[in-house]
Image: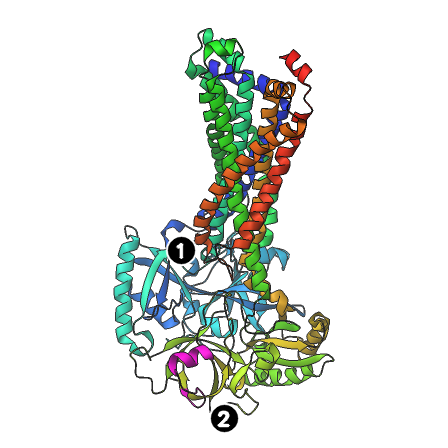
Amino acid sequence: METLLKDIVFSLRLLRRRPGPTIVIVLSLALGIGVNTTIFSFVNAILLRPLPRVEKPERLVELYTSYAGGMRFGAVSYLDYIDMRDRNQSFSGILAQRLTLVNLSRDGENEIVPAAVVSGNYFSVLGVKAARERTFLPEEDQTPGTNPVAVISYGLWQRRFGADPALVGKTITVNAHSFTVIGIAPERFVGANVGLAPDIWIPLAMQAVAMPGSDRLKDRGIRWIELVGRLKPGVSLQQAQAALSTLTSQIAQENPLTNKGTTATVVKLGGGTAGIQSTLYPILTLLMIIVILVLLIACFNAANLLLARAAVRRKEIGIRLAMGASRARLIRQLLTEGVLLSAASGALAFPLAYWSAAVLLAFQPPTSFPILLDSKLDWKTLVFTVAISFLTGIIFGLVPAVQSSSPELLPVLKEEPTLQGYRKSRLRNLFVVAQVAISFVLLIGAGLFIKSLLQARTNSVGFQPQNVLIASIDVGLGGYDQNRGTIFYQQLIPRIEALPGVRSASLAKAVPLDVGATQQIGVVIEGLATPRNTNMPVDYNVVTPRYFETLGIPLLEGRDFSQGDSLGSPGVVIVNEALAQRFWPGQHALGKRLAVSGGKGRMLEVVGLAKNSKYYGLREDPRPFIYLPFLQAYRSGMTLHVNSADDPRSLLNSVRQQVQQLDQGVPIFNVKTMTEHLGVALFELRAAAVLLSVFGLLALFLATSGLYGMMAYSVNQRKKEIGIRMALGAQRSDILKLIIREGMLLTLLGLIIGLAVAAGLTRLLSTLLYGVNAIDLSTYAIVTLLLAGVAFLSSLLPAREATKVDPIRALRYE
């Protein structure tokens, strides 16, 4: 220990003696360690940190179902849930949940808040007790519509109700219905989904109130709730999977119309469809790889500087070896210097990560259901920072320590050049080449995502988003039944269309390219003789007349819906090209018939054929899609689409006023332009493009500074050689070309290696790109020219200094 303390004191004295290189090393490593700590804090929050306040979260699993044709529902029906809950042998409990938005009213003010409709055993399965009073009792979730009770979050209790201690036992108004608050959830409890934190929990028995417009408790064909189970002690994931598969087969045999061919899958909590892990996992993995590459560049930079420092200390090291110091002792001393530098970098990186984590939160997906990520720097993040700092010190300090501790004694003491010095120079060159290669790979990735983003903004998505305003309205949240809701919407559309500047207006259940907007319905095609023609899942939307005109979706054949397509008239449907080509290839779709709801609904006649468009994602292939008329398929929650002749933002206040004039109790929310809404679909590309650009430019800065530092050091060490060359007649232009040629040769080698690596790695990104080939020649050319230009400037400055060497002074000095 005493020897170690002496090494630390001696290293601190040396580092203080040369503050310039020390500051450069600490800052470059702090940037590399800081970005790694930042990204790790999000990986920790989303993938590693257990659910807060939940008992033994490692025993929790997700259960989801898949259709025989390979379509994953990710959810089950309420009746399937009851069977799984009561008949399984592998779980001590299975809870059901569905996240939704509700209208919380108080003192005449409406607020849309996130809520969870959950089974009565929700809190007991999670092992969570209320902070105040109690959670749900089993009997409160047995008889539909009879127990309007609610548990509210600790945050809502403080924010909306001022932490009123007497709130429990009082009533609150949710969707125009009174609910009794029976308890306050614990502080920091977010439920069973990472990143998705409800403010209110409501029993499944009150689903018709919490999710108005349909009664989902009696139809086995409606798959709408997510399941989370707690494994019994001693039961493995594989055993639970086998038992649940058997149970699912039994349920399918008992209910062939709705469950034929359905299978179930069990995964660890966070590995399925619940939460946001599956959405953010690809981009988090990509970012972790990127920041590790940035850290490698910083390590190469630091190693180069340490090699340069060691070259200056060659005589000192040679004397110490000559006096009997062992090589292991010298390596330990030199490694101590590296670890001290990395420790200082880690200390600086932690506050940098704290600041940058707040900036990174701006890149969360723009969803209607608020996302809550706790990216605070906890003890895991601290341990990660300490560990990566120590590892970094070893990585960038080991090679210089080993190289510097074995000089050839005689030439060193005579201050003569050695073969070892040449090898060190070659090693420094190798580090520079590696920095350039890694920078090239990162910049290529940034360039491809930037081009993908530009392509996505200019390419057609099958509809015209320009000059369209959208606003979500849910009359069910205002207490409307189907009859009143239909009248409300029929009165609203003419009011909106009468506003100055409005070309057309329409309503739709779903907005194209909305996060989590996937909705499917079982379809049976008339006359289609195939075993799969039973409750085939098909994507759909419910729309009012003029929807296709409002969004600019061409109708290729047939007609639009009309006010005559009401509940008492023959059933009609509009299909897209993909569905027509799949089920009626080479035939006219008009006049064909199909039934929805697994064949239990009436037959609908195809009256229109719509052009394909993008429904859920930019990269999706054309998929079968149907449109149902609103008057024949009522939904309480709809989105108003308004096509304006001018800037749609000018209609914001007018649209709100029209809704409020009809009924102030009906909430209007998520009001924005369709162009702004497209940011949802572009989120992944935009986040990847911005973050890759930032990290790519950071890598470029570190690589070019490393090249500049190496070239500047080389010029300083070669003053005698340069002086001799100039004394023998070399011109300043010759010296300039010599230094620049050496720097550009290193850059060329780095570019060649980077090109080969990028060509292989970018193919892995092809699934994340849009409209751009992984080997995009223009992107490769631009990045190559950028790196070559910056490298030229990094070599030019030391080269200009070399031309200023006075031959006489250089020779006299030597």
Tell me which label, 1 or 2, sits earlier in the chain. Answer: 1
Residue hosting label 2 = 568
Q: Is residue 569 above or below residue 85?
A: below
Measuring 61% from the left and 32% from the top, which residue is drawn there?
A: 737
Few, some or many residues within 10 Å of mark 2 (<14, 14–19, 20+): few
Q: Type of residue at label 2? A: Gly
In the drawing, does residue 294 fall left or right of residue 119? Answer: right
Q: Residue 111 carries which label?
A: none
Q: Can residue 599 be seen in the rendering of this structure? A: no
The residue identified by callout 1 is 271
Locate the C terminus by quadrant. top right
User: Is residue 780 in the magenta section?
Assistant: no
Label 1 neighbour load within 10 Å: few <14, some 14-19, many 20+: some
Q: Where is residue 416 in the image (x, y as percent from the top left)?
A: 52, 13
| Horizontal relation, residue 463 to residue 773: left or right | right
Way the structure is coloured: rainbow
Which residue: 50% across, 44% down?
A: 40
Front one among 13 and 584? 584
| Element at label 1 | loop
Q: Examine the rendering and report whether any part of residue 283 can be seen.
A: yes
Measuring from the top left, give residue 544's x and y in whole percent. 56, 83
* Horizontal and vertical percent position of residue 528: 33, 84
Residue at the farthest top position: 323
Magenta highlight on residue 583: yes
Q: Nearer the viewer, residue 86 or 637?
A: 637
- Give the residue drawn at x 57%, y 80%: 548
Q: Is residue 504 above or below residue 111?
A: below
- Which amino acid type is shown beneath numbered disc 1? Gly
Magenta-highlighted residues = 577-593
Image spot of residue 663 (x, y percent): 66, 78
